[in-house]
Image (tube, grey):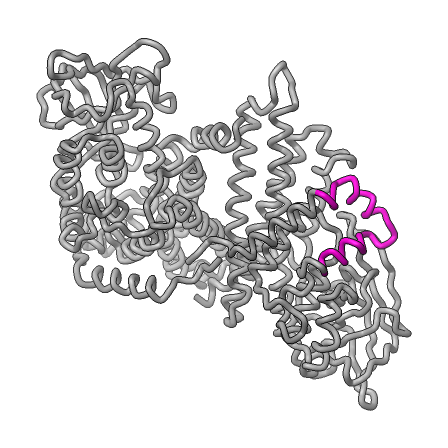
Amino acid sequence: MDLNFTAGEQTFREEVRGFLRARLPGEISRKVLGGKRMEKNDFVQWQKILHEQGWGAVAWPVAFGGTGWNAVQQHIFDEECADAGAPMQLPFGLKMVAPVIMAFGNPAQQQRFLPRIVDGTDWWCQGYSEPGSGSDLASLKMRAVREGDHYVVSGQKTWNTLGQYADWIFCLVRTSTEGRQQAGISFLLIDMKTPGITVRPIIMLDGEHEINEVWFEDVRVPVENLIGEENKGWTYAKFLLGHERTGIAGVGRSKRELKKLKDIARKETAGGRPLIEDQRFRDRIAQVELELMALEITNLRVISSESDADGKKRAPGPEASILKIKGSEIQQMLTELQMQALGHYALPYIEDALNAGWPGDPQMAAYADHAAALSGHYFNYRKTTIYGGSNEIQKNIISQMILGL
Amino acid sequence: MDFNYTEEQLALQDTLRRFIARDYAFEHRRELAKSADGFSRPAWKTFADFGILALPFHEDFGGLNGNAVDTMLVMEMLGRGLALEPYASTVVLCGGLLRDAGSIAQKEALLPAIAGGELMLAFAHYEPGTRYQLDRVATTAMAIGSGWKLDGAKAVVLGAPSADKLVVSAKDGKGISLFLVDARAPGVTLRAYPTQDGARAADIKFANVAVGAGALIGTAGAALPAIERAVDYANAALCAEAVGIMSALNEVTLEYLKTRKQFGVPIGKFQALQHRMADMVIATEQARSMATLAAVRVDSADAAERSRSVAAAKAYVTQSARLVGQQAVQLHGGMGVVDELNVAHYFKRLTMIGLSFGDTDYHLGRFSDTLLAA
């Protein structure tokens, strides 16, 4: 039992830091650290830089172009990237569809799709939820009917994140209505340029366009885009959700946001004194920090137990639900306190201020640059306990899979 | 970074687990709590045979060179068994003080006796009206000839009724000093009582208690850092004990949810109860992480790092313990509030851990104040 990093791990951390200093573009990190609006190219450019370094997919095995790093190395990388203000590597390709393609795809699919994920060529998005199928995902209705060497797909997906930029979408589709509803689901990869696909924005409560509805009207998808076997998609879907949940812990990003919260609490004043000297507010910060300290270790315990002695990864178990619940709650607490720290200046909604390079307004000098994003983040982050399987669904998973209730 | 126990640690854990299951069943424990001593002397002898009384001491003094992770493992198992023996008082707290601050002669005289199970100790430090402040001591030590004379009162000294010797803090004008005092010395008066969780404690009066020069532990007036370290060490141990109790409490509660039927089905089929049980499991896993942090950091040479980590862990674990304890009682319904089931006893012990050596607010405050410096 040892929570200290080894000399080798420290050296590794220095290597990651050195790389970030040298290669992370300042205009991108300033956006991330300032909570500014991100553009597609910010994500793509960063993925390409990582790929050039050979670090495009830190959780993948070497055989597929990953780093083969162990759990602790991945944790260090995650922490350093977040701290430096690197954009989050979007999970849809790297952490969601890729593990499914590796585990259940055929070699042709692996060779076709995986290199284009790791090098940043393809932007992937997710087609899981439907208007009538949220928490009850297995009730999904979008039909895929086999016609010769194509599936013809019709229906609607929703809560699709950043699909407005996507080249590909992975979808759960209904290929059978026989038997249990879980038994008629297949996992299909669909080119977003295929005729019959329409992406319609859903504007979120913070005023931003992050999610979409995606409509499919007689979309013809080649059968070679089917993953694994027809009607076995539910198994792959659950496998994917397990992978999604570990990433959702977001320890590195929360550590960065905690630091930011403390910075804000030192800058903002109350009664002429720094807000952090207000014991009531400081204790709230302390309480979140405790949660995060515990989660950091729980996260390491879970991901270490998912690595075999030779560092090979196993699929995340239901313990990942614990990480998802705690991780999302902490993210929400942090955004709430950041907003609260602003006092009156939590109220203004100045749309332009979210753009990088906003020059500020002389008449609102007290409206600090860091203020613009904080209330919006609070509103936006209510999503975290809802997406990826709501926290209530996670508790069902714990009850059933861990506790056998 | 490594989250695994060594082979030796796993073997010790297994030994203790079997002992608790075989020789420390709940019914037996209930009898012990009502007995004169309030614990089992044969069990204490067995602990000596297992080596756990020697664990944190250097081999030169009959010890096993164990670290705080070893102590964590022991405390977790003692927690599962709701062991009544004053392990934390004698071995962790007083043993730790002697190990860190005692002279060679004191260590030679006392540590092998602790290790062999022949000597029990209690730490007489807190006083009425000081709550959890470690630097408030009103008891006085006056230098008389080559020795000292102690006067004052100590509050709720855990394990005192069975202690052969007391480690007593007193102020000598310069600062706080520690003295080793025979529990039956003239002028020492114990008002002994059971605690809510079935253990034993006492309020103690010291009136004109004479001790020799050899009774002083460490340097006169300079004991506070050693006291702070020992109490951190005790708190880390209590965190581990709490985790052991929470794990055991979750197991019995889960079993109850699966077997107790209402409306024709096991009550564990109801989602309101399932989610509460899930909350208890999450709280316990998070508490385990923090108890591990405390165990690893409490051995740190950096006092600020040590105390920050222990404060964090105790503040967190006590909140988890409160949730798990209260919800275990709730999920057991009426059976949760009766004396004959172990549930209430686990709950009471968890509650007392939360009030010993600093409560949630005290430790959260300690941790919170470190944010000012950062």
Residue B320, percent across and down?
57, 45
- Up/down of A55 relative to A325, above or below: below
> Residue B371 or A327: which is nearer the viewer?
A327
User: Which residue, as the protein is rendered here, is positioned at the far right?
Assistant: B186
Specify the quadrant that holds the C terminus of chain B.
bottom left
Q: Residue at x 42, y 36 (%)?
A: A321
Is residue B42 magenta-colored? yes
Q: What residue is at 19 percent from the left and 57 percent from the top?
A: A24
Q: Quadrant of residue A60?
A: top left
Residue B311 image position (x, y, % from top left): 56, 59
The N terminus of chain B sits in image quarter: bottom left
* Secondary structure predominantly adopted by residues drawn in magenta: helix
Q: Position of residue B276 (x, y in %)?
A: 56, 32
Kindly tell me whether residue A367 is visible in this rendering: no
State the extent of the magenta-drawn residues as a range: B22-48
Measured along the vertical axis of the image, is residue A280 above or below residue A130? Answer: below
Q: Residue at x 43, y 62 (%)?
A: A4
Residue B338: x %, y % from top left: 77, 34
Most distant residue in the top direction: A178
B185 falls in the magenta region:
no
